[in-house]
Structure formats: structure tokens, C-alpha cells
Image: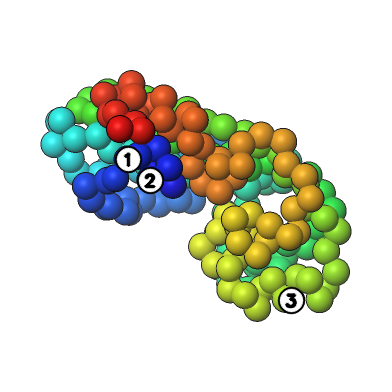
């Protein structure tokens, strides 16, 4: 997605952090905390720009992370079936000791899912590693008739906001 901004990273270093939500932690603060913690643990020189993001699916106050297995993915999809939910993506950019942050909240409606649709989607394995057990940019896009907000944020990186954060850190976009 960074390529859409004309940005090519020099390196990709996945941060290793504990992504367990705190007791009674709400989805939006949780997502922002994850992005901040990720950007803080990446080793980089003072002149390097580090970008990290986190995406969380929230049904009310419930945080729906990445399902551990197909059974949990089925449970998530069953809960989301026919309902609106929020997708929160937080982005943090760090250069030296300075951190810039933004989060974007979008609303997504999933159609009412028949058991066969859930089974068919699960068989694609596209749910693996996806918050809420689905990725709108893949086969699950056929299950989403309506969104309000940022499509790129739902995918996992809000491009408009990310461009602004990178520019604030001195990165040229679209050059």
C-alpha cells in the first residue's frame, strides 16, 4: 500500500509485542496503543522513519482480533453476520524521539451470512491473520455490501492519514 504513495521502505522489521488487550480496554484506545507500542520497539537510527499500524475489528466494546483457528473465525463471522461493526486502524510514525499518530474509524456492514457462505469463505483460508476473521480486500469483499469511512483503513493502512504523517516526519510522497 505504501507503493500507492510512492514510498518504498528500506527494510521491513515486524515488531514483536504482546497484543493482548488490557482488562476492560476499549477498542479504539487499544488499537492506538498497539500502533504506539509497535513503533516504539523497532530498532532504528535517529534519522530513520519508522511506520507501524494496527487494525482492530470492534463489535460494540468487544475487540475481535486475529482468530486463532477456523472455529474462532466461524464464531467471529457468525457474530458479524447481518450487523454493523467498526474497523479501527491506528498508524504511528517515529523519527528519533518524535512520534506522530492518527487513527481512523470506519463502519462496515456485513450481509446476513448463510452457513454455506461462512464455510466457503473459511475454506479460502483468507481469514488467517485478519482482525475479525476477514479481509475486505479479498474474497470477503463479497460479504460486505456497505461501508462508511476509509476503504484503505479497513484494509489496514489509511493512505490519506499515512501520507500526512510521513510528510510530517520529512518523507516525500509521490516523488
Q: Which residue carries the number 3 mark?
A: 119
Please state, as top left, top right, bottom left or bottom right, where the C terminus lies in the image.
top left
Between the C-alphas of marks 3 and 2, the distance is 34 Å
Provide the secondary structure element on which disc 3 rests: helix
Q: In the depicted view, which residue is nearer to us: 90 or 28?
A: 90
* Mark 3 surroundings: few (<14), some (14-19) or many (≥20) residues within 10 A: few
**Quarter-of-image position of residue 80:** bottom right
Q: Residue at x 29, y 28 (%)?
A: 172
Label 1 vs label 3, nearer the camera: 1
Q: Residue at x 60, y 66 (%)?
A: 127
Q: In the depicted view, which residue is nearer to us: 27 or 126?
A: 126
Q: Which residue carries the number 2 mark?
A: 3
**Quarter-of-image position of residue 116:** bottom right
Residue contact at pointers 1 and 3, CB within 8 angstroms: no
Specify whether 18 is left or right of 69. Answer: left
Specify whether 64 is left or right of 54. Answer: right
**Quarter-of-image position of residue 47:** top left
Residue contact at pointers 2 and 1, CB within 8 angstroms: yes
Specify whether 95 is left or right of 152. Answer: left
Amino acid at each position: 500500500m505504501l507503493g500507492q504513495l510512492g514510498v518504498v521502505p528500506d527494510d521491513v522489521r515486524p515488531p514483536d509485542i504482546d497484543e493482548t488487550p488490557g482488562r476492560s480496554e476499549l477498542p479504539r484506545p487499544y488499537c492506538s496503543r498497539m500502533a504506539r507500542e509497535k513503533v516504539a520497539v523497532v530498532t532504528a537510527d535517529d534519522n530513520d522513519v519508522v511506520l507501524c499500524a494496527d487494525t482492530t475489528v470492534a463489535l460494540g466494546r468487544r475487540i475481535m482480533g486475529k482468530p486463532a483457528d477456523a472455529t474462532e473465525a466461524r464464531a467471529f463471522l457468525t457474530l458479524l453476520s447481518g450487523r454493523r461493526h467498526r474497523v479501527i486502524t491506528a498508524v504511528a510514525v517515529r523519527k528519533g524521539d518524535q512520534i506522530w499518530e492518527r487513527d481512523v474509524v470506519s463502519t462496515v456492514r456485513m450481509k446476513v451470512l448463510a452457513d454455506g457462505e461462512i464455510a466457503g469463505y473459511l475454506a479460502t483460508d483468507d481469514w488467517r491473520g485478519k482482525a475479525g476473521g476477514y479481509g475486505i480486500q479479498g474474497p470477503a469483499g463479497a460479504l460486505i455490501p456497505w461501508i462508511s469511512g476509509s476503504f484503505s483503513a479497513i484494509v489496514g493502512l489509511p493512505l490519506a492519514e499515512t501520507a500526512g504523517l510521513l510528510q510530517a516526519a520529512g518523507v516525500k510522497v509521490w516523488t
